Amino acid sequence: MPARSDNPANSVVPILIVDDDVKLCRLVRDYLEPLGYEVTAAYTGPEGLEVAAREQFSAIILDVMLPGMNGFDVLRNLRAKSNVPVLMLTGRGEEADRIVGLELGADDYLPKTFSTRELLARLRATIRRSNVTRMREESGEPEVVVGELRIDPESRCAALSHKALPLTAVEFDLLLSLAKAAGRVRTREQLLDEVADRNFDVFDRSIDVHISSLRKKLGDDSKSPRFIVTVRSAGYMLRKPEPAEVA
């Protein structure tokens, strides 16, 4: 059975793929375009950045190994200006590449041995999560305050002791989810459902990588946490401050 079109209203979803493998770019384009996607290809890091700055895309598929500028540097430059969803491709699916990409703000990753069905599923989930985030922004959710931590879902800004926190999109969503449930444990599955909006493999530990990065930005210590507590075999919890800490 052929995959359904993602665009029943005949609108198109613009996608940018940045990869020096011309055959792979053509394969992705040939697979996605009948489903309602409009695929633009760039073959070097600098070209990808230039195209991303010039046009609006619903998501970017970004290879790690690129001529001119590697994918990590491209992502770093993108994140300085944009929260466009980024799905990274790693040549060997190595954990180190995944960790670096996630810490820099990638929304998801795929090894380059992916199947077209898996690419489509990850792409749909990444875009869907981005759309949910945008709708939350437009809904005017109230500010969430936990001790000295303030999170504004509408502006997607977070601050600790009145100092802005430079969070990636995933880190912000994680922090917001934990803050809304302050004092209660959120399992990895709950966080993944809310933040990533897709089913991760049971061995996928990317949520832990994002939590680790979030802790660093909060100045937190996992062994003696002020904010995010690891609950063994359960998940994570944002501590509610004691009355003495608030006073």
Image (cartoon, grey):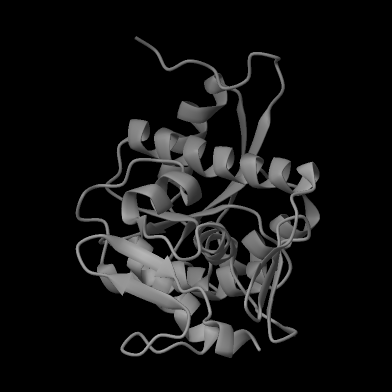
Question: Can you say which quadrant of the picture contains the C terminus?
Answer: bottom right
Total label count?
A: 0
Residue 14 is left or right of residue 34, and the answer is: right
Residue 147 is left or right of residue 240, and the answer is: right
Quarter assignment of residue 58: top right
Q: Nearer the viewer, residue 225 or 97?
A: 225
Q: Does residue 209 show up?
A: yes
Please state the horizontal and vertical placement of residue 25, each as a whole percent of the image.
Answer: 48, 43
Q: Nearer the viewer, residue 176 or 39?
A: 176
Please state the horizontal and vertical placement of residue 145, each as a whole percent of the image.
Answer: 67, 69
Extreme top residue here?
1
Residue 200 position (above or below residue 78): above
Quarter assignment of residue 173: bottom right
Question: Can you say which quadrant of the picture contains the N terminus?
Answer: top left
Quarter assignment of residue 102: bottom left
Please state the horizontal and vertical placement of residue 164, each as a whole percent of the image.
Answer: 72, 81
Q: Residue at x 80, y 48 (%)?
A: 140
Q: Does residue 101 show up?
A: no
Residue 233 position (above or below residue 5): below
Extreme front residue here?
243
Q: Nearer the viewer, residue 21 or 9?
A: 9
